[in-house]
């Protein structure tokens, strides 16, 4: 089973600041990684797929990068509505696995 | 517009059974892979099961193998998850997820809560 480790656990930043979230895989997953955003009481929303492709309707301030085992989600300029938990997920192999999540708090 | 409407959750005793349903609209479930993902209270996301659209091949996380069965009714455009021998650790919100053809979840239902408790 591929383990995805996200860091940091919590990120507290002000509006307009840049957020950098990390996801590290226990073995190579080429670029088969997605990022999801989940707000309280809501279902997750797909942000990024195949490491760097923005999903439909996702603002350009969200970007993804990386390949192999190390991946990054960047929010270039935080908005208040970006307060959420962010999860990475791999589709390289079964079982599909998620990271434990990074909580982004807006000061 | 793609919509996924889950139903069938509720309170069940350990060892009991439930069948979750996911009524899909705005697309045809035979054209896309589909999954169930769960989230225990206050915890992260856990992939449970997937069904491949082309050959109906199924995939499960080890902890539910032999107890859960994913299936679909094409005439009703509905996905199911039959859950037997339920355990306390199966307590979670269960999400029905439409996958892209590259196997990432692009549409999620609002979830249905399953509580396993005596």
Image (cartoon, coloured by chain):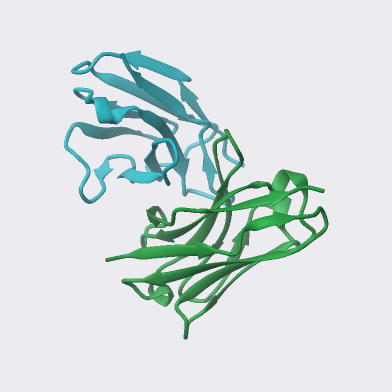
Q: In which quarter of the image is the C terminus of chain A?
A: top left
Q: Which residue is drawn at 44% across and 18% down?
A: A10
Q: Residue at x 24, y 33 (%)?
A: A63
The location of residue B103, given as percent across then percent down, is 42, 57
The location of residue B118, given as percent across then percent down, is 82, 48
User: Chain A's shade in the image?
Assistant: cyan
The location of residue B107, given as percent across then percent down, is 37, 56
Nearer to me, B6 or B54:
B6
Specify whether residue A28 is in view: yes
Nearer to me, B96 or B70:
B96
Nearer to me, A71 or B35:
B35
Q: Residue at x 57, y 71 (%)?
A: B57
Specify whether residue A8 is in view: no
Q: Quadrant of the N terminus of chain A?
A: top right
The location of residue A30, given as percent across then percent down, is 41, 42
Nearer to me, A9 or A69:
A9
B61 horizontally vs B50: left or right: right
Please tell me whether residue A29 is drawn above or below residue B23 in the rendered image.
above
Please tell me whether residue B64 is drawn above or below residue A67 in the rendered image.
below
Q: Which residue is drawn at 32% across and 21% down?
A: A20
The green-coloured chain is labelled B
Q: Quadrant of residue A21?
A: top left
A62 horizontally vs B16: left or right: left
């Amino acid at each position: 089973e591929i383990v995805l480790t996200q860091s940091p656990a919590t990120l507290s930043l002000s509006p307009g600041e840049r957020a950098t979230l990390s996801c590290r895989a226990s073995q190579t997953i080429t670029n088969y990684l997605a990022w999801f955003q989940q707000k309280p009481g809501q279902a997750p929303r797909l942000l990024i797929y195949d490491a760097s492709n923005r999903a439909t309707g996702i603002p350009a301030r969200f970007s993804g990068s990386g390949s192999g085992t190390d991946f990054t989600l960047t929010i270039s300029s935080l908005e208040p509505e970006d307060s959420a938990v962010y999860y990475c997920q791999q589709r390289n192999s079964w079982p599909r696995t998620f990271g434990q999540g990074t909580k982004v708090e807006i000061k | 517009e793609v919509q996924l409407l889950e139903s069938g959750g509720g309170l069940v005793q350990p060892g009991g059974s439930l069948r979750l349903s996911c009524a899909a609209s705005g697309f045809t479930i035979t054209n896309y892979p589909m999954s169930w993902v769960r989230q225990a209270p206050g915890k992260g996301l856990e992939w449970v099961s997937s069904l491949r659209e082309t050959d109906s091949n199924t995939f499960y996380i080890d902890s539910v193998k032999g107890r859960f069965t994913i299936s679909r009714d094409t005439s009703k455009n509905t996905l199911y998850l039959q859950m037997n021998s339920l355990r306390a650790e199966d307590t979670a919100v269960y999400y029905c997820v439409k996958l892209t053809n590259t196997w990432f979840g692009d549409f999620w239902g609002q979830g249905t809560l399953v509580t396993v408790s005596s």
